[in-house]
């Protein structure tokens, strides 16, 4: 899946995903560093990006949000006052 498709599925902007990938917070399966290289993402990557984007929207920093997303199982729901993150669409 290309970055634009992942952004659409995950509800994140292209700039967010690109920034997180350049920081090393996210990594795609075919990430070859350098300009002009297209990243290819899996559906699991899209789910992880969606969780990170949800957490960032409510004020969480991207790196801790990624750790939270990685720790969640596929059918898990995390809730707190004013927050609900779900691992599945």
Image: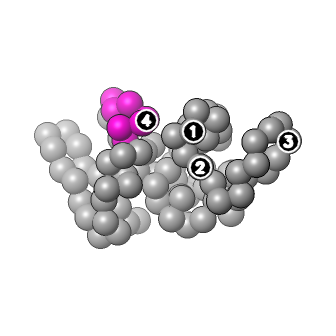
Sooner in the amino-acid sequence: mark 2 or mark 3: 2
| Disc 1 packing (10 Å; few <14; some 14–19; many ≥20) | few
Contact between marks 2 and 1 (CB within 8 A): the answer is yes
Question: Could you say whether the residue bearing mark 3 is in a helix, strand or loop?
Answer: loop
Sooner in the amino-acid sequence: mark 4 or mark 2: 2
Contact between marks 4 and 3 (CB within 8 A): the answer is no
Question: Could you say whether the residue bearing mark 2 is in a helix, strand or loop?
Answer: loop
Q: Which residue is mark 1?
A: 24
Q: CA distance from mark 1 to mark 3?
A: 17 Å
Give whichever of 21, 43 is nearer the camera: 21
Q: Is residue 87 visible?
A: yes
Q: Nearer the viewer, mark 4 or mark 2?
A: 2
39 within the magenta span = no
Sooner in the amino-acid sequence: mark 4 or mark 3: 3
Sooner in the amino-acid sequence: mark 1 or mark 3: 1
* Image quadrant occupied by the N terminus: bottom right
Question: Could you say whether the residue bearing mark 4 is in a helix, strand or loop?
Answer: helix
* Image quadrant occupied by the C terminus: bottom left
Q: Which residue is mark 2?
A: 27
Q: Which residue is mark 4?
A: 62
Q: CA distance from mark 2 to mark 3?
A: 16 Å
């Amino acid at each position: 899946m290309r970055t634009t498709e992942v952004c659409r599925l995950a509800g994140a902007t292209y700039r967010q995903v690109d920034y997180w990938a350049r920081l090393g917070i996210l990594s795609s399966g075919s990430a070859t560093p350098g300009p002009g290289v297209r990243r290819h993402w899996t559906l699991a990557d899209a789910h992880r990006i969606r969780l990170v984007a949800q957490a960032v929207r409510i004020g969480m920093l991207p790196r801790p949000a990624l750790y939270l997303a990685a720790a969640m199982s596929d059918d898990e729901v995390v809730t707190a006052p004013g927050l609900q993150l779900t691992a599945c669409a």
